Image (cartoon, grey):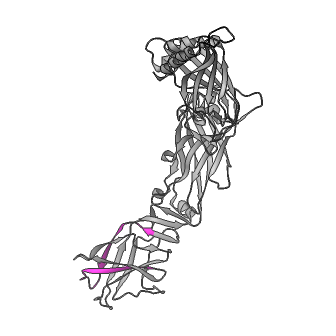
Amino acid sequence: MKRKIFFLLFLIFPLLLTACTNPQGGIGPSWDVTARIPLLKGNEENKLTVYDLFGENFNPEGAITVTLADGDITLFDLGTKMSTISITDNEIKIPIVQQLPEFNPELSEFAKINFGISFSNLILGKNQIPFEISGENVDIDSISFSIFVDGFSRHKYVVSVGTDGSGLLELDNYVNYSSDNVFIAAEYPNIDENSETELILKFPEKLYIESITCDVNEYLGDNEIDTKIDFEIELNIDEKTMEKVDFNADLVINLQTLDGMEIDLENLTFTIMGNKTDVFVAELRDLDDTGTRKTIEFKDGKDILDIILDPEIKGLKVSGDYIISGEEVTITYDSKVGIESVEVQIPFDIAVEDDLVFTTNVVKLEPVDEDIRELLKHDLEGAFVVEGLHNKFGMSLIMELYIASIPGNRTDEELEEILYKSENMIKRASIQKMKEYNVPYTVKVDAEELDIFFEDNLYAGIKFIVPANEEGERYKITGEDELTFDRMYISITGKINK
């Protein structure tokens, strides 16, 4: 309504100037009047980003990253495998004394707990150790056990004794065993020092642990833990962009380790799942000096993208062995190590072999109304205008404007299919790379192309094109790349009073 009032004022104003003539012979002066037809307004949706080019797998830190497998299926559950520690002497006979000292470097009368391996620190979980008291005096209702580590008393357990002389000692995580020099002793204040009463502890073959700090090689070797690698990868990557772009892709394995631990992979092979049965033997090289990121190369020269994009290949079965080492490593019951993830990483140094095309959503336009049509009927000039245009890509882009009259109720899919046809392209423009247009970016529209704007049921859309590279040329992509704008519109200018 405001637009109509504005132009009606222009109709009235020339009547006040009837004494004037213009060069073309009309009464009074003539002047230009411009109408703007809004197309698109820039926002989070109406812009072009690297995510539009390369999808959600885009990693702004330096590559497109497609995770093929993660720790849910790949990690080695070391904590569960090392959740127990062996006891070599299952039955320990210890004397019962009247009183135990806080410190005894000799420990000649106490029994040593012989663990299966050496360690520098151990915290036990809950363990129940049955015991029996026998001898001349078994009338004992409770007894105290003390754990000595390196001669120092660490913790005392007071345990009830049944009428038959039996009981249950529950070792727990109250004690921090700072070395494997561990002894256990028992005291009962009323014991007769001259009696031959003895106590037998019946340890299980293994004790549950919360954590252990030890030479992990020694533990793994003595316990014969299976460190095999065995998991499967499904391949379901979107091929649209990859088919048109020449990528130099890396197959990367990220390793998860513990302080003081080194992990390596041995005999790593990838077996194809699907209609083919090829087996690829992998060679590893470090991607950085941490030793935890390794790139995989297949010995026969097969490229990972050839495998991923092969429709006959449905997945990969990965097998091999972990080589784990470390002299002073702390493992807890929930420690997981090994392959944290398997990823395809695609650096932003690419060659586009076929044009990459991206389109905006179709928008409906209001046609030019009758009043404006009547006013703008002489010497029409048109322009496609983009305000606040910034192209931060390191490449030139092509922008095409499509407008069509599409009658009837159509779905969004139908509108896109009808609109984005060559006959509906109004204007094609090139946008320079790394260019900020500080003044409105304007492309002239010929007068004969303006007739479409006076029709009904108008729809418009923008197509962005990343053109294919020239031979030998490659695009450099960064995480900051995007094309943004404030608004797009069509400007139609005509003369009044001609």
Q: Is residue 18 above or below residue 188?
A: above
* For residue 463, side relative to residue 181 (left or right): right
The answer to whether residue 313 is visible is yes
Quadrant of the drawing holding the C terminus: top right
Residue 121 locus on image (x, y percent): 50, 71
| Quarter of the figure with residue 493 | top right
Q: Which residues are magenta?
A: 123-149
Along the line of sight, which residue is nearer the eye, 32 or 111? 32
Q: Is residue 133 magenta?
A: yes
Name the residue located 44 percent from the left edge and 11 percent from the top edge: 408
Along the line of sight, which residue is nearer the eye, 178 or 426? 426
Name the residue located 31 percent from the left edge and 85 percent from the top edge: 188
Residue 174 locus on image (x, y percent): 39, 72
Q: Is residue 453 magenta?
A: no
| Quarter of the figure with residue 144 | bottom left
Quadrant of the drawing holding the N terminus: top left
Residue 101 locus on image (x, y percent): 40, 88
Q: Residue furthest top?
A: 25
Residue 390 locus on image (x, y percent): 64, 35
Along the line of sight, which residue is nearer the eye, 19 or 215? 19
- Disc tally is 0
Q: Is residue 170 above or below residue 270?
A: below
| Quarter of the figure with residue 14 | top right
Along the line of sight, which residue is nearer the eye, 308 or 325? 308
- The secondary structure making up most of the magenta span is strand
